[in-house]
Amino acid sequence: MTPGEARCLLAARRPNGADDADPAIAEALAVLRQHPESAAWVRAEQNLDQQVATQLRQVQPPPDLKERLLAGRPKAYAPSSAPAPIHTFNHPSPPPSPSRDTSKWTPAPTPRGFRLPWGLIGGLVAAAAAIVMTVTVVQSRTRAAAIAAENSVQTFQQFVADYMSNGWDKSFDLPTSDYTRVSGWLAAQPGAVTFVAPGQLTQGGTLGCRVFDWKDRKVTLVSFRIGTSETAVHVLGINRDELSDAPITRSVGTVGEWNTSSWTEGGVTYVVLTKVELNTLRRLL
């Protein structure tokens, strides 16, 4: 199942988990656990549904709505006591009897369709307009929040962590231990960021570098060797304008199997992924 198929399927999933036992739903949920961007989209859709439902529950009908609806029922039409006129098609009608006053003959009224009072119609239209406006505002705010979530530093961290664990074949566009060569090569690559690594990382040399895409955005990767061991610190850089909440101060934490740190400097947001323990990571940065 592709992420797109999972999104379509989960768009109809009930938020209370009643559908989660279904094998297709379970498979779709498993797919989303491997694709943070699609998971954020589904969460935004579910949040929108819940917010719209909450807003609709807050719309109260007028207290006299029932009476006003009943007042708009069609009136009963009493049948005419006079006999219906006799149609003779193309034959001339005989002269009326002198004892019958045909001027008082009237055809039975034809019932009209059901009509609501204009005041009630106006009230219903206003209520419908209020509901539409509420749904529109909630939807626009939720969409904006969804876009921000899809481009957040947390989503980017989750993506690069998954990429480094499962999507990367451990190869480099430029395999080299010379950081000076790395800097020169990156400067010539369209879309690559101007990479500035912490000084202590450059002392052990590099394993190499590469440039790849995240949602049509360029991501720059430089892997640094720590000491003489093969333990590496992977530093990924992206233009800060590509993220909705680029971090200002440096933070340290974990994402999946990786210890991580992130910060923004010189218009570039950096995310570090490594298996070295957090205290060592703090000293290196």
Image: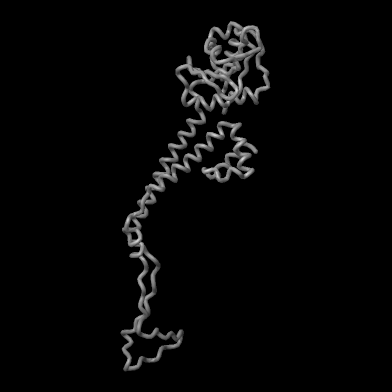
For residue 170, above or below residue 284: below
Percent x, y for residue 149?
49, 31
Labels in figure, total: 0
Residue 226 or residue 105, whichever sits in front? 226
Query: Is residue 211 among the parts visible in the rendering?
Result: yes
In the picture, residue 55 is in which quadrant?
A: top left
Percent x, y for residue 34?
61, 31
Q: How is the image coloured?
A: one colour
Q: Residue furthest top?
A: 203
Residue 133 or residue 27, whichever sits in front? 27
Residue at image position (33%, 65%) is: 71
Query: Is residue 190 among the parts visible in the rendering?
Result: no
For residue 205, above or below residue 165: above
Percent x, y for residue 92?
42, 88
Residue at image position (52%, 26%) is: 154
For residue 229, above or below residue 61: above
Residue at image position (36%, 73%) is: 76
Q: Quadrant of the N terminus?
A: top right
Query: On the picture, is 231 further left or further right than 18?
Result: right
Percent x, y for residue 225?
62, 10
Residue 280 or residue 134, whichever sits in front? 280
